[in-house]
Image (cartoon, rainbow, N blue to C red):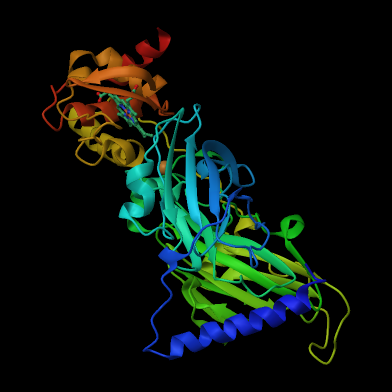
Amino acid sequence: MKNNMKLYSMLCVLALAAWGCKQNTASEKPIDSSKIEVKGEAQAELTSPPHVPKPIGNRAATKLKVDLEILECEGEIVDGVKYTYWTFGGSVPGQFIRTRVGDEVEFLLKNHPDNKLPHNIDLHAVTGPGGGAESSLVAPGHEVTFSFKCLNPGLYVYHCATAPVGMHIANGMYGLILVEPEGGLAPVDREYYVMQGDFYTEGGYGDKGLQAFDMNKAIKEEADYVVFNGHVNALVNDNALQAKVGETIRLFVGNGGPNLVSSFHVIGEIFDRVHVEGGDLINKNIQTTLIPAGGAAIVEFKVDVPGTLVLVDHSIFRAFNKGALGMMKIEGEENPKIYSGKQMDGIYLPEGGTIQKMPSSKKVESTVAKTPEQSIADGKAIFSRTCLACHQSEGQGVKGVFPPLAKSDYLNNSKDKAIDAVLNGVKGEITVNGQKYNSVMPSQTLSDQEVADVLNYVYNNWGNNKTVLSPADIKNHRGK
Ligand code: HEC
Ligand SMILES: [Cu+2]
């Protein structure tokens, strides 16, 4: 990359200058990108974060094939805390897609057969209904294709837009697609891919074990984790980004949300240039740039002295207590004229990682039987926490995906089947109120009392048959 750098940068300075002028002459018509002709075809290189595909440079517009596979997989959000991520390509954020203006993208979206849910993709770089979402809904074990032409240069977010949309995004279904302008971006020494996201778990920060998604916290926007690249330590210590003194760095920074806006800042650096919101507008000498949920920015800076730079969301409790902290280690010669001493390593360790929890006084399960009213009331909270995300707030379900629990014949005809659904999950084709469903409900890890409570809540609402179950009923069923 470096050898050609001078030549490239000269060309690009010219290209950028021309680009810049265009913005200032209001009378000039914008180029009609839809008229750019494509030459040949190519397979897009896709990369997992923090890496980005090779620059497009000045290649001609082409028919670009993108082949992206959706994978639902378990990972660690922080040491000892497991989370079931839903991903585009096996990573959070999803694989980076690099195109240029005028490219005709032929998009192949595959939903792995082991996945449990249908998904789709909405690319903000697409001009067309739903950003592709309407054409790309795909069930597990299936694939779909659709095409679009990249009309506007910029850095764009893509995400899943399958109901419940917030849940799919919260589970990690987002990534970035870059559309380079004619002639490409100015060359730099290193480029990296960083994307922020907020996560909502049943337990609090650091609570061990497999943590389920918590719809209630997500609605209230009370994030337990705010992280770069899907995990608390994705860019920390051994995973830190690397660079050398004197190099120019470009970060493609996205924010998947689902909820929070990022105040993106690098401790110890000033952004020489920021492509504001990922578009054409260049701002210079920036300390902190705002990245909306569902938005992006390109930040560029030269590193002048060695040490560890710290990437943060400057809503600072997120950085030190929820995980929104990454590092870039710069190696090279000191330059006392710029900075008098070596920056200290490891000073900015996340505090959350070392917070000691008081042993929680274990909830004593009451030995006194609950009244049906108490059980139903307690069941409501469990429903909101564990079932609502899929079956929806009034048990109405989502057509074709999540069956209704309201007036459900499946539920009302057999309490055994209902108990079984919650204890062991449901797989394969089932019919609910005359409608066929062929999806998967994951088994729920609830105590006998909790299963009784949640089913009592369901049975005693929304026109169901008012069955009342006791913890003993659940225990008996487990024995079967
Ligand atoms: C991740 C999504 C998801 C969650 C969470 C979930 N379910 Fe389900 N549930 C499903 C799907 C999908 C089916 C249908 C499975 C099939 O097609 O084989 C289903 C089916 C059912 C059924 C049988 C069909 C019907 O409509 O009566 C019951 C009962 C049920 N779920 C109850 C619950 C309860 C109670 C909870 C919470 C403790 C819960 N589910 C949590 C997705 C979910
Ligand atoms: Cu999805």
301 to 445, vertically: above or below: below
* Quarter the N terminus occupies: bottom right
374 to 191, vertically: above or below: above
359 to 302, vertically: above or below: above
Residue 298 in sight: yes
- Number of numbered discs: 0
Q: Residue at x 59, y 69 (%)?
A: 312
Q: Quadrant of residue 377?
A: top left
- The outermost residue toward the right is 333
Residue 225 in sight: no
- Between residue 350 and residue 226, name the one nearer to us: 226
Q: Point out residue 240 in the picture as x, y percentages from the top left corner.
A: 72, 61
Q: Residue at x 38, y 81 (%)?
A: 29
Q: Point out residue 381 in the picture as x, y percentages from the top left corner.
A: 29, 41
Q: Point out residue 56 in the picture as x, y percentages from the top left corner.
A: 63, 63
Q: Quadrant of residue 436?
A: top left
* Quarter the C terminus occupies: top left
- The outermost residue toward the top is 480
Task: Report the side of 143 relative to 419 (left or right).
Answer: right
- Between residue 40 and residue 18, name the one nearer to us: 40
- Between residue 153 and residue 325, name the one nearer to us: 153
Report ligand 1 position as a quadrant: top left
Task: Report the side of 26 relative to 276 (left or right).
Answer: left
- Between residue 375 and residue 168, name the one nearer to us: 168
Q: Point out residue 285 in the picture as x, y percentages from the top left corner.
A: 60, 87
